Image: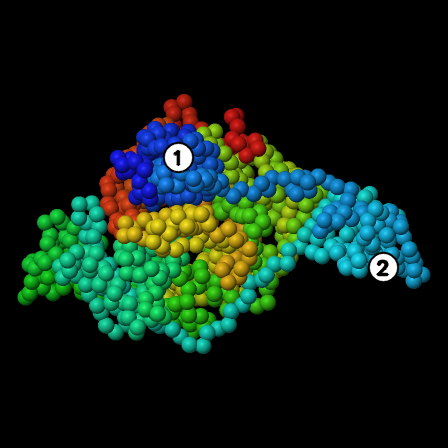
Amino acid sequence: MDNFLNSKNIYNSKWGDYKYSLNNSILTINSIRRALDKFNLEVISKLENNEIIWIFFKVRILNGPFRNISCLQRVNKLEFGKLEDIFIEYWNIKSSEYHVYPIVEIIFTYKIMGESLQNEKTKLVAPKIINKNKSLLQINGLYDTINFGGYNLPPTMDITKWGNCDFFNNYNEARVFKFNSKSMYFVKLYDKHLQADLKINDKTVVSFKDSLLDVTNLGTFIREIGNQRYEFINQKLIRKSKTYNTKFIQPLSGEVYYKNNFITMDLETKTINGKMVVYHISIFDGVNFSNFYLTDYLDSETMVINAVLSLMKRKYNGYKIYLHNFSNFDGIFLLKTITSLTDKINIIKKDDKIINLQVKFGNNYSILFRDSLLMLPLSLRNLCKSFQIEDKSIFPFDFVNEESTKLNYIGKVPGFKYFKDISTKEYREYCKNFNNKEWNLKNETANYCNQDVKTLYLIIDKFSKNIFDLFRVNVLNYPTLSSLSFAIYRTVFIKEYKIPILTGELYEFIKKGYTGGAVDVYKPYGKNIFRYDVNSLYPYIMKNEPSPVSYPTLIEGDISNLNLNDISFVEADVIAPNNLNIPILQTRIKSKNGDIRTISPVGRWTGVYTTKEIKYSLELGYKFKFIRAVKFEKNYIFNEFVDYFYALKKNSSKDSSNYVIAKLILNSLSGRFGLDPFLDKHVIVDENKTVELEKKYTINSIINFDNGKELVSYSDKDTSLDLKKNPNVCVAISANITASARVFMAKFKINNDALYYSDTDSIDTSILLDPKFVGSELGQFKLEHIFKESVYLAPKVYGGITNNYEYVKVKGLKNVLTYKELVPLLYKEKSLEIKQDKWYKDLSKGNISVQNEIYTLIVTDNKRKLIYDENNKFIDTKPLKINNNIIIEE
């Protein structure tokens, strides 16, 4: 822990981290409480009562970076105790990923602001949680009258009960003087409906139309007011619906000119005392190379500054600078340096990934740093093969990291042991290049890096030209593959489909039903197991299932007669039969220790599901009580898109650029619609200006660069729909695709005693599938592996052996494991500890440190209840049982 308490009353002290180790265990509510108690004892207790402290709650996931859990909180010593409930609430609403994987440590990042702020109020910011468990009608009560615009309207079409009536025009019209009011109804009467205007002093305050449902009962009718509809039975309001006048995602026009104003860049590092240091930079603008080598500069930071300054030239105005893995690697070293050169920086950032970094210089000039890996998520070696570009060269990376290696080394070719992933034959061929000359580390580093940046340049250029020729879309305008796929769809395939832009309460409601694919372990060990994967599951669903379109309608009240053939997202109380071994509906629940996870349980709970899920679940014995629903029209809006790219993929060889393009674009569109419409904003400011931002906005993250600058991420209080600021999003599209995919997969899982494991688009089973489901067509299964034996320890943690090879997958583990190492873990309390190098990225210091850590592998019970035999061997699972979204004991 950094000690900031030696000198009291220091206003605006430096940021520090208080770390509470969890030894790679699952984070529980009690862990948060214990961490806060220790932090209180060791830090807060030493403050004066009126000293203000800023604090973030963070965690570091095993084999992952730290994650912000809370936004910025401002407290003093006396109110510190209130943070416990606030932080627990933030933890509970985080995605299930945070609750499944082991946590290395809890981190409280804090800054003591001092007594000079003693008159300033504390500010505890709770997470925004919208209670959607009850309909508005249930919350407000069912009324005999409705209130619209502040005016109570009568629950009947019998206008004689509205007030004193004055009929005229052969009783086809009437003026109704409202009782005890200065207002008056002007009514036109028809056979089965009426049109009314409520006026005050000849000014219309509300207009509505009433239509009879029962000609014998004037109290049973439908009232329509603007975009709202009210249904009455015997003068009782039973159902309310509201159609939202949403905006629609608009098509794009194809572009006229191809753009190739981009540059490629590469950073090479060596590890010194556990920290990575940049020692070489290569830049290629399509014609010329620029090289920067550490021995030519005072230090690494000076070298990086010179490299960035070489790009800040008028001739490069508007250029995109691509680095392969900028978001997770190169950007760590560059961002701090860039902040020291200019304040004019615009950032698009998600979690810890920098998506787009615009750097402005001069009066009207700018360059943008991008990650080519976000556009082409494959290794350079694989991309070279697909785009038929000259392959990467080889280089002795391990030699550079030898402590004894000097950067000015000139001598013999480093030994074979320093090269990775090459054969002895390749090594001998490489050595022949230096038979008559010495090997020069500086020169060979430049040669290797120059080949890399040239290769990347040629790949991006070829990819961009292919995309432009096919769709008149410029790749350089889009920072990610999903944004490019979306642009292609809007340019060529969107037609006149009315895809609504969903924000606010509609987004929040439907997002509750957006729970992703189902991943579960059913049986932990098997023999003769067949692994089947679906050919392009999501594209298959996009083509063969209708999508929600047009204006959404929110329906509340009695919706028991909801048409399940429509596309609706329905909030419902659910009862799942206890005899189901493989339930299909997913929900987020709170475990006994307080953590949140996504499971498929039996029991009772409340959740949001599509009508397709509900219809299929009814066949399995589920029971529902509908609370409210958001209904859409439906249309097949992806047919041409899927047909085009699947045909391109199918008719191209797997090592061709067209195959790569088709596969990447095809699989990148569905999730783009589900983006959060209100993304954080990010600014780099002088650290003394952060206080002003904190007073205006909810601060979600602060990164201090120790150079007087801070990267502040904040939420704007204005959440109104602004198409210039908010992305074109429709979470209903993404949620409907994933829900329909779960139903598709469920039909191969339910009542299947031979099922061992399932992922989003795959199943492991001990029986062969019916041949009619197997093939190369869209939506058919392909047989990937035949395991003689296989072990399944947890979601994304499994392995098997075939007649020819082993296949082991452990999410988050870099080291290679053997199948034999997994088998002993079937026994209770058995674990496997693996040492591996872990990278810790620090944007604030602009470096990456390397630490050797222990990865502990053990069976987990996050999704289903584990069953052990008398020898404590893991032999089976069964679904968890819940009541009101909380796990209950069997």
Amino acid carrying label 2: it is: Lys
Residue at the extreme top of the image, as rendered: 870
Q: Could you say where residue 310 lies in the image, as x and y percent from the top left?
A: 24, 67
Please report the residue visible at 83 percent of the width from the left and 57 percent of the height from the top: 186
831, 553: nearer the viewer: 553
Q: Is residue 195 shown left or right of residue 421?
A: right
Amino acid type at circle 1 is Asn
Q: Look at mark 1 in the image and give the residue it sits on.
A: 50
Q: Position of residue 746 (x, y in %)?
A: 54, 44
Residue 347 visible from this viewpoint: yes
Estimate the x, y position of residue 146 in percent, counting from the top left. 75, 46
**Among the 4 quarters of the image, the one containing residue 45:** top left
| Left or right of 322 on screen, residue 240 | right
Figure check: 1 above or below 692 = above
Residue at (60, 39) in percent of width and height: 133
Q: Earlier in the sequence, mark 1 or mark 2?
A: 1
Residue 827: percent from left, percent from top = 36, 29
Q: Residue at x 9, y 61 (%)?
A: 439
Q: Which mark is residue 778?
A: none
Residue located beneath label 2 in the image: 188
Q: Is residue 255 left or right of residue 216?
A: left
**CA gap, disc 1 to disc 2?**
68 Å
Disc number lying in front (1 or 2): 1
SS class, disc 2: strand
Image quadrant assignment for residue 83: top left
Q: Nearer the viewer, residue 727 or 637?
A: 727
* Residue 60 visible, this angle: no
Q: Secondary structure at mark 1?
A: loop
Can you say which quadrant of the picture contains the N terminus? top left
**Residue drawn where x is 45% and y is 45% of the image:** 759
* Label 1–label 2 contact, CB within 8 A: no
